[in-house]
Image: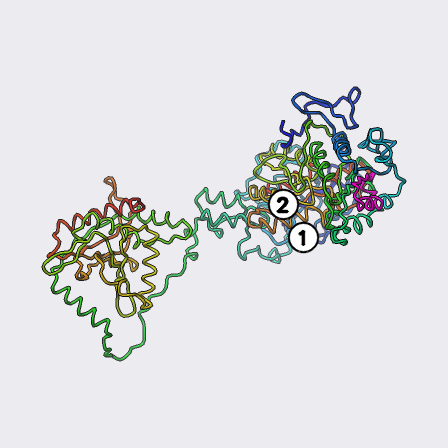
């Protein structure tokens, strides 16, 4: 705390008096009741006992000087606070109270440092006072509470309360001014990015027998890639609205909708509009399905499996999300029942979580199409003829040309893009 | 006027003491179902109405009958109800308090007047050891429907022994209800509630508020215990004030409004039970609180409210809860020192500014 020691009226009629001598000097520690100076009042020389003790930081009225009652004679601190502002303020007060000082010049503002007169004794080193409180941040409970909701980084806020305490008005002012944004000033606030683990000790080469699962994957995908006439249709989706929608939906307690859930939902709706993609190739016939039963590729230890979200077109985002998470967990735990991974009508393979730019997938026979979903990237997009920052996601459809033609695939992708770029459509 | 909403604090006009009664139970009838009363009339009215309604109520104390009460709160009751129900006692607080507790145990509803709550101290043992414990110690066989009433707080220049405010003292003990009205409207409504329930009540009437005038409903109303009232709405700082301090707090709020600080003045009305939810909700809005009371600081009502706020709304506080109390010295006789000892508006203004970091 900063304490101003005001020149006391030592008699009922005293309005001014001379500070005869100081008994303390800057750096001295003073207790309540100690005599700090002698003052000549209009009646006698009397001792000045102080009520509030502290450490003498600054003496403003030198010995031998006439002083007015209530002028600031000295400034004490209790915790070694910085007194620069207090000194400037006290000097303004003293000027106002000085004879003829009724209409003082504008008080010196703290920003323009007032040159200190040399008169004050500076024998004792000021460094003997403890350093200003530097540890941690002092903040009122409600200021701390609203700081997080307003996105204010308390470490970049200057407190105006006692001892620099950050109080509500400081946080509100910082939020209004846009300074001290969380994450802007404090890079250290972000969780540290894990280091790239590429350095390791050399090992010997090794042969590892393929597991039955890997043998099946190999056999089936070799057959698919070599016997199905694949062709590919790629599309870029402006995913800004999609990301925003996901954030909004996830404000609901109990919701954790992923981009993948949104794509499953969008694909199901698009498949209902373009049934040629919702099919299996039977050798001499093609079977078109009414229901969009979507296989979702899930990575499991040493392989992958495609559990099915059955009747995905009838399910809302929460149902899809909950179902995918249950199926994925079962897949990883090896507990999927055959009905849960056999018989889908369309597959989605999503590598978005790795931030992949784009990729193409191999069709999962006897299905006739598979959608490869890449990550959402911050990229420039053109809006209304202007290049603006946007979020772009690339989708690539692989289709079986025996069952599907280019125009069908393109029409499906166009619908899919339109749904994903107007994602409120996925909520109905 | 609905009898259930508090009327404006300021009376529509002052009572003219030359031509109009300022005591007794008769208010001055105004149009639209209201009457102009002083707090002393409001209290007498509550006693009169309830004694009419319930023959088991009687009143006892020093000079309550023939002299009409030292503060004229019981004026006219002797003539109306006779010497069996309005009884003068010797100067023996311990004696008539004990008598009243015994009467309450037999099923009567005694009201005792302490000429001043300062004089309740000779009866302290009866109040604490008997009145507040009897129902508990007899397993509920003997509830004590006793109303103890009288003037409380500092009068003008009555010095150290006669200036006590006893809210904190009596709130300390389980088993007592402590009522501290700030207006005639509340004095009447709370007194009627006190006379209809079965626990010992310390009804603390502020001596300096007896002449406070207000328009109150003519129709019957009761004010429940434990329900506070917001006397003024504001956004920057909650001032919780009790009894006479409510009026000082309102003065301070006017002063602070000129400097752009908007205060919400909350009157708990009963100190025990305390409407902490009302106070906490106000602080959730303002983030700051100053408690004003005529009790002392150590173990005072402010200490209790500050602690409960810390427990309830710690995360909503922007500043430590401030307390403006009677300073911790025996009340001086000198008027200028008395002024500085009491929690007067200038001290409230300073405390609110401190809480607002201004």
Magenta span of residues: B97-121
Q: Position of residue B67 (x, y in %)?
A: 87, 31
* Mark 1 secondary-structure assignment: strand
Q: CA distance from mark 1 to mark 2?
A: 38 Å
Res A72 quadrant in image: top right
Percent position (x, y) of residue B251?
67, 33
Picture layout, residue B158 above or below residue A357 = above
Q: Chain of mark 1?
A: A
On residue B276, the disc is 2
Task: Tell me the residue that label 1 is attached to.
Answer: A54
Q: Does residue B337 appear anywhere in the picture?
A: no
Answer few, some or many: residues within 10 Å of disc 1's Cα (few below 14, many 20 plus, some between 14 and 19): many
Q: Is residue B12 magenta?
A: no
B114 inside magenta stretch = yes
- Give the camera-side residue of B121 and B67: B67
Residue positioned most to the top: B19
Q: Which residue lies most toward the left here?
A: A284
- Classify residue B36 by image quadrant: top right
Percent x, y of residue B347:
69, 39
Task: List the single residue furthest toward the right.
Answer: B90
Instruction: For mark 2, give the secondary structure.
Output: helix
Q: Would residue A198 appear left or right of A102 to someone viewing this image?
A: left
Q: Quadrant of the C terminus of chain A?
A: top left
Relative to B289, does residue A102 appear above or below in the rendering? Answer: above
User: Along the line of sight, which residue is nearer the eye, B170 or A111?
Assistant: B170
**Figure check: B167 above or below A335:** above
- Please tell me which residue is depicted at 15% across the width and 67% down the height of the picture: A222
Examine the image and state in which quarter residue B259 appears.
top right
Q: What's the colour scheme?
A: rainbow
Residue B68 screen position, x and y as percent: 84, 31
Quick one: A19 or B279, which is closer to the camera? Answer: B279
* Other residues around mark 2 within 10 Å, as few (<14) / some (14–19) / many (≥20): some
């Amino acid at each position: 705390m900063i304490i101003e020691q005001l020149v006391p009226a030592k008699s009922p009629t005293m309005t001014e008096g001379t500070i005869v001598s100081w008994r303390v000097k800057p750096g001295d520690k003073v207790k309540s009741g100690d005599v700090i100076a002698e003052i000549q009042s209009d009646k006698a020389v009397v001792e000045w006992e102080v009520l509030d003790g502290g450490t003498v930081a600054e003496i403003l009225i030198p010995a031998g000087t006439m002083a007015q009652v209530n002028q600031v004679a000295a400034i004490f601190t209790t915790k070694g606070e910085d007194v620069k502002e207090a000194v400037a303020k006290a000097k303004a007060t003293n000027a106002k109270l000085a004879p003829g000082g009724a209409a003082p010049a504008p008080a010196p503002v703290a920003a323009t440092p007032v040159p200190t007169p040399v008169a004050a004794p500076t024998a004792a080193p000021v460094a003997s006072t403890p350093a200003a409180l530097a540890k941690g941040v002092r903040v009122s409970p409600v200021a701390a509470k609203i700081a997080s909701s307003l996105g204010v980084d308390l470490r970049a806020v200057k407190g105006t309360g006692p001892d620099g305490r950050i109080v509500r008005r400081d946080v509100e002012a910082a939020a209004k001014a846009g300074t001290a944004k969380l994450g802007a000033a404090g890079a250290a606030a972000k969780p540290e990015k894990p280091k790239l683990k590429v350095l390791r000790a050399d090992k010997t080469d090794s042969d590892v027998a393929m597991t039955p699962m890997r043998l099946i994957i190999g056999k089936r995908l070799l057959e698919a890639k070599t016997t199905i006439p694949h062709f590919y249709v790629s599309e870029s989706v402006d995913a800004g609205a999609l990301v925003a929608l996901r954030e909004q939906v996830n404000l609901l307690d109990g919701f954790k909708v992923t981009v993948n859930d949104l794509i499953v939902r969008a694909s199901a709706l698009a498949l209902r509009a373009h049934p040629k993609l919702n099919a299996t190739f039977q050798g001499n016939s093609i079977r078109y399905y009414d229901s969009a039963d979507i296989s979702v590729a899930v990575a499991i230890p040493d392989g992958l499996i495609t559990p099915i979200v059955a009747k995905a077109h009838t399910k809302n985002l929460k149902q899809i999300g909950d179902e995918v998470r249950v199926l994925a967990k079962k897949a990883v735990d090896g507990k999927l029942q055959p009905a849960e991974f056999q018989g889908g009508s369309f597959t989605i393979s999503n590598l978005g979580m790795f931030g992949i730019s784009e990729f193409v997938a191999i069709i999962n026979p006897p299905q006739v199409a598979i959608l490869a979903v890449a990550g959402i990237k911050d990229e420039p997009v053109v809006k209304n003829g202007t290049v603006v920052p946007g979020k772009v996601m690339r989708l690539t459809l692989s289709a079986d040309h025996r069952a599907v033609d280019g125009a069908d695939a393109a029409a499906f992708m166009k619908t899919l893009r339109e749904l994903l770029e107007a994602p409120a459509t996925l909520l109905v | 006027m609905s009898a259930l909403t508090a009327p404006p604090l300021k009376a529509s006009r002052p009572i003219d003491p030359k031509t109009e009664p300022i005591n007794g139970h008769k208010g001055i009838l105004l149009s639209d179902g209201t009457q102009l009363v002083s707090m002393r009339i409001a209290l007498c009215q509550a006693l009169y109405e309830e004694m009419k309604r319930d023959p088991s109520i009687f009143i006892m104390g020093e000079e309550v009958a023939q002299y009409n009460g030292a503060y004229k709160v019981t004026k006219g009751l002797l003539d109306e109800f006779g010497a069996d129900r309005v009884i003068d006692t010797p100067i023996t607080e311990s004696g008539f308090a004990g008598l009243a507790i015994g009467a309450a145990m037999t099923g009567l509803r005694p009201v005792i007047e302490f000429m001043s709550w300062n004089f309740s101290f000779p009866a302290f043992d009866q109040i604490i050891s008997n009145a507040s414990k009897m129902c508990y110690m007899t397993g509920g066989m003997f509830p004590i429907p006793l109303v103890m009433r009288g003037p409380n707080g500092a009068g003008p220049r009555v010095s150290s022994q006669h200036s006590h405010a006893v809210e904190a003292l009596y709130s300390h003990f389980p088993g007592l209800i402590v009522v501290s009205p700030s207006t005639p409207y509340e004095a009447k409504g709370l007194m009627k509630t006190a006379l209809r329930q079965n626990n010992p009540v310390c009804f603390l009437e502020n001596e300096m508020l007896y002449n406070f005038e207000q328009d109150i409903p003519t129709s019957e109303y009761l004010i429940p215990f434990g329900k506070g009232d917001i006397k003024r709405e504001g956004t920057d700082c909650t001032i919780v004030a009790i009894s006479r301090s409510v009026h000082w707090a309102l003065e301070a709020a006017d002063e602070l409004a000129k400097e752009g600080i908007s205060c919400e003045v909350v009157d708990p009305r009963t100190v025990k039970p305390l409407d902490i939810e009302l106070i906490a909700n106000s602080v959730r809005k303002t983030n700051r609180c100053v408690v004003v009371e005529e009790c002392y600081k150590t173990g005072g009502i402010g200490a209790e409210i500050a602690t409960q706020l810390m427990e309830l709304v710690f995360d909503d506080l922007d500043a430590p809860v401030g307390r403006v109390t009677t300073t911790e010295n025996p009340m001086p006789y000198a008027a200028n020192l008395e002024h500085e000892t009491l929690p007067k508006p200038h001290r409230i203004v300073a405390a609110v500014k401190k809480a607002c970091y201004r």
